[in-house]
Image (spheres, coloured by chain):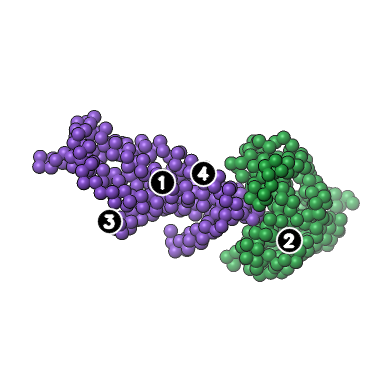
Amino acid sequence: MNFTNFGRYILLLKSVFRRPEKLKIYLKEIAKQMDYVGVGSLGLIAIISTFIGAVMTLQIAFQLVSDFIPKTIIGSVNRDSSILELSPTISAIVLAGKIGSAISSEIGSMRVTEQIDALEIMGINAPGYLILPKIISGITMVPMLVIISMFLSITGGYIGGSVSGAVTPAEYIQGITTDFNPYTITVALVKAFVFGFIITSVPAYEGFYVRGGALEVSQASTRAVVISCISILACDYIVTQLLL
Amino acid sequence: MIEIKDIYKSFSGNNVLQGISGKFEEGVTNLIIGGSGSGKTTLLKCMVGLHQPDSGSVLYDGRDFTPMTYEQRIEVRKEIGMLFQGSALFDSMTVEENIMFPLNMFTDQTRSEKIDRVNFCLERVNLAGKNKLFPAELSGGMKKRVGIARAISMNPKYLFCDEPNSGLDPKTSIVIDELIQEITEEYKTTTIVVTHDMNSVMGIGDYILFLHEGKKFWEGSNKEIAHTDIKELNDFVFASRFMKAAKDKF
C-alpha cells in the first residue's frame, strides 16, 4: 500500500463512519455479517487451533531433552504461546484468507456490476452500508473466535500430549495452571481487535476501488489477502512491542 | 427540468466532454445519443454526481447540483431514479427486496404499505407475482423491468436510463422504450435516456442531444433528425444499410 492508497484508505474509512441512514437496516446487516464472520468461521478455527495445540505440545516435548527441566513446562509454554501468539495471529491469517477474499470479491463484484453506483444514486452512503457492518462484525467476532481458539489450542495440547505420551495429563494441567498471568489475555484480545479491523477494512478497500471486470476483481481479492497478512504481522509486532 | 451548462470533463488529459449545454424538460423523453466514446455515459454520470465535472453546472429545477455538499446531494438524489445498463440489481436480494430497498431506507411506511407499493411497481412493469425471484432467475428484459420498478418506487422527479436496450432483442427493446415513455408521461418525470439504439431514437426521442467526440453537434426531435445536413449526425443515424436505403427511398 503506497501513500496514495493509504490516503484513500483513510478517506474511505471517514465515509464508512458517517451517520447511518437508518439504524435498523444497519443492525440487521451487522447481525448477518456477525453470523458469517463468527459462526461461519467457527469450524475452521476449531480444527486449526486444536491441531496447532497438539503439534505444539509434541514439538516442545521434543526440544526439552534435559532431565533438569520439569515436564510441566510443556503445558505452560504451550499455554503462553497459544494465548499470546498462535491463537490471535494464526486465526487472523486464516480468517484473512477466508473472510478477506470473500469481502473483497463481494464488494468488487458490486462495483463492476454498478450496484455500488446504484446505492450512491439512491442517496445511500455506500461505504457505510457495505463496509461498516463488516468492520463491526470483524472487531467483535474475531476476539470471540480468538478466545475459543485459545481454549481449543490448550485443549489440543492436552489431547496431543496424552495420546502420544509426551506428557502426562496431570503434568500438563499442572503446567497450564502454574504462574498464569491474566494480562496475556488482554494482550491477545487487543491483537484480535486490531486484526479484526484489518481483516475487514483492507479487503473492503481493495474491493471498493476495483476498476474493470472479473479479472480485476480476482486480482483485488489476492491483493487484499496479501496486504492483510502483511499488515497483521506488522501490527502483531507493534502491539507486542507496546504491550509487553 | 434539468439544465446543464457548459460541462467540461477530462480524464488524464483526455478531454471527454467539451462545453456541453442543454435543457431537458419534464414529461418528455430526452435522449442523449452518440457513438461509442462520444462521452454520453460520462455526461450522464456528471449529471447524477458519479463524476464531478471539471467545470460547468447541473441544475435540477434551478438547484445547482455541482457545488452541493454530500448532505445536500442526498436530498436531490432521493428524487432521482436510475436504470443502469446492466440493471445493477442487488444479487443477494429478491425482486421484492430490491424494489423495497429505497423504501426501507428512506420512508417510515409500514410493511404492508411497502408491499403494496412493490406490487404496484411490479404491475406497472408487467411483472406481477415475480416478487420472490432472485435476479439470477430473471431474463435480461425482466431485469431491466425490475430496474425500472426499483427506479420508480420512490416516485422520482428525475429518471435516468443508461443504455436501457443494450443486450435486448428488438421486441423487448420496444417494450422497455414504451414503458419508459409511458412512465415519463404518466408521472411527468424529467427523463433522460442515454442510447445509441436508432429504434429508440426514432420511437421515443422527443428531445435529442447528439454528442460527437465530446462536443454537442446537434439538438432537436426525432422528427427533425433525418433531415439535417450535419455529416457527423448523418453518419451516425444512417450508419446501417437499412437506414441508408430507407433514406434513399424517401
Q: Residue A20: x percent and y percent?
A: 57, 54
Residue identified by numbered label 3: A244
Chain under callout 1: A
Look at 73% across and 49% down and name the residue there.
B152
Cα separation between marks 1 and 2: 53 Å
Q: Chain of mark 4?
A: A
Task: Tell me how far mark 3 sits from mark 4, CA to CA.
Answer: 34 Å
**Could you tell me which secondary element the residue under label 2 belongs to?**
strand
Q: Where's residue B207, x and y in %?
A: 81, 58
Local secondary structure at mark 4: helix
* Residue that label 1 marks: A142
In terms of secondary structure, where does tag 1 sit? helix
Q: Are marks 4 and 2 in contact (CB under 8 Å)?
A: no
Report the residue marked by disc 2: B211
Q: Which residue is mark 4?
A: A31
Which quarter of the figure has residue B55?
Answer: bottom right
In contact (CB < 8 Å): disc 1 and disc 2: no
- Establish if B56 lies above or below B79: below
Question: From the viewer's perspective, is the residue at label 3 or at label 2 nearer?
Answer: 3
For discs 1 and 2, the disc positioned in front in the rendered view: 1
The color chain A is rendered in? purple
Q: Colour of chain B?
A: green
